[in-house]
Image (cartoon, helix red, strand yellow):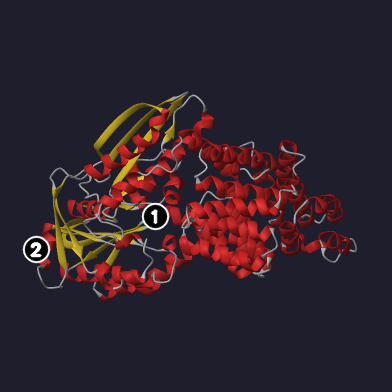
Amino acid sequence: MCAEHVERRLAAILAADLVGYTRLLEANEEDTLNALRQHRRELFDPAVASHGGHIIKVMGDGFLIEFGSVLNAARCAVEIQRGMLERSIGIPADRHFVFRMGLNLGDIVFDGDDFHGDGVNVAVRLQALAVPGGIACSAAVRHEIGNKLGVDFADQGDRTVKNISRPVHVYFADWGNVASIGEALPANWHTQASFSKPSVAILPFANISNDPSQEFFSDGITEDIITDLSNVSGLFVLSRNTVFTWKGRSENLQRIARELGVAYVVEGSVRKAGNHVRINAELIDAASDGHVWAARYDRDLTDIFEVQDEIAKAIVEQLKVKLLPDEKRAIEQAPTESVEAYTHYLRGREYNHIASKSNYLMARQSFARAIELDPGYARAYAGAAVCDARLRSQFGVKFPVNDILENAAKALAIDPNLAEAYAARGLALAVAGNRAEADSAFEQALSLGPNCHEANRYYAEFCVTNGQFEPAATYFQRALEIKPADYGAPMMLVNVFRSLGQVDRAESYARIAIKKAEDEMRLHPENANVACLGATALAFLGLRDRALEWLARALATDPNDINIQYNAACTYALLGEIDRAIDLLEVWMPQIGAEMRLWFKNDSDLDSIRSHPRYSRLVELSE
């Protein structure tokens, strides 16, 4: 028996990796896989072939490609990056497919069906150093290309990378992505960051207090640091919605950085006890897995905003970013003068997470207390308006419409550019029956904050009540992309796509919804709302026993919540128990507001009851 043939050859190796692939899959697995196949078929694979390349390994979201010529490899890399930039025009930023690329010249050793060699390893490490949409190359590649491609290079110096014994001299190829067509893309698109702009992800700070209910406080600190650093023009900072998909997951930091497409990661912890708080924070270089900076802050709770400022400024200083005067003022501007008001606002937002009557009432109290402590707290007024609108519409609580509108107006008077406040105004106007102005308010919210989860989610619901299912699908999908943990959005998409006659897509989202519901129930077993919504998705898929099990769990947890009773009716309707469904709806209908009655008329969960003789009685009750 002869030994396997071993072949060694010098080649240009291109390593390409799709940034945020896991996040894209979690948001929408079916659409992500279809889009990746389309990008490969129409751009990626033809570009490789036309430049004489050979894909030697595919790793789901990553590729290793061999070229006989460095110039051809570089031309291929630039063609793909430019092509992906063009293909992203007009697509929301969180749905962009963006590659990072590493290019090296070195040996590949082929041993049977396997291959290895430093040439491959260095290409992979270079790819990890590249910014999203960028190309990092070795000194050998940079010198081989010279001026032959009209590509500029930014010298990054020697970098120490994992599992490579010697430093690697790194260059970033500036192929003009920002200068050429970047202006046609949304302003927050991440490849618009210049190649010299550091990219950083602030991971959710861990709550290590003895009280697990203090989670809302550590989340609030994380979000405020993200907001502060997002105001710094010399930094690219990932949004709250993207990084919070990693909350509670114990992963290697280098893998997290690779998935998120950043060069640096910040992680930390918060311990709150009475009027004292301890915060640990550290900045890590993803390429070397080395600590750049770390600090511990032991302070009184009243110093919390000062600590947030210090952390933000320390990160800016460590990354050698110039802080402009306006940016410094923005970092130093606290959301409120009262730490106690801030705490009540954060707690109110946490209560809102579970959409039950009791939770909305508790959230309402928290927002009211925040306003009492700081009458100039815009977000607290917006939160109060949303609570009251939900309670009036979904649970029939007779809060005066003018009071709801007044809270939204106060939020806008304090901060006219607050997207959340316009979204709250949209809800308030819808509850008031002023649908034309509500539509305008939602549009304004999306104009000010296209990545505002509340604006997209509330507008999607409003579109359903208008019977406008195509825009509803768009905004629910956008809400899910912005906040992948949102279990409600895929639940609603089941209804919307069924109304559009797209049953396959409805089934796909039902499976997504059930998975997200399972995740939510593990985190919040007290959340009866998620169990009853999940029951409707299970019933739609024909999983009768599981649907009834989840419904029983919801009813046992919160039997008097009329929203859960409505979803129980939906589950029974989907399971063919028509009279049982109508019995519940006849009790439910007189208790709710006008918006929920419009939802009832457009809810495809109830299609099976519409031909029943008792349905006309339900319609009379809804008038």
| Residue under label 2 | 143
Residue 546 drawn at (x, y percent): 70, 46
Q: Secondary structure at mark 1?
A: loop
Q: Judge whether 345 appears above or below 411 on screen.
A: above
Residue 572 appears at what percent x and percent y? 79, 52
Task: Point out which mark residue 400 bears.
Answer: none
Mark nearer the N terminus (1 vs 2): 1
Q: Position of residue 593 (x, y in %)?
A: 75, 55
**Does any portion of residue 362 appear in the rendered image?**
yes
Which amino acid is tagged 1? Gly
Question: What residue sits 47% from the left and 23% below the top?
Answer: 274
Percent coordinates x, y for residue 392 in the rendering: 71, 50
Instruction: Name the amino acid, label 2.
Output: His
Residue at the right extreme, as displayed: 613
Numbered mark located on residue 20 in the image: 1
Instruction: From the viewer's side, name the closer residue of 93 and 72.
Output: 93
Residue at 68% of width from left, 41% of height from top? 528
434 sits to left or right of 477: right
Which image quarter: residue 39? bottom left
Q: Residues within 10 Å of mark 1 (few under 14, many from 20)?
A: many
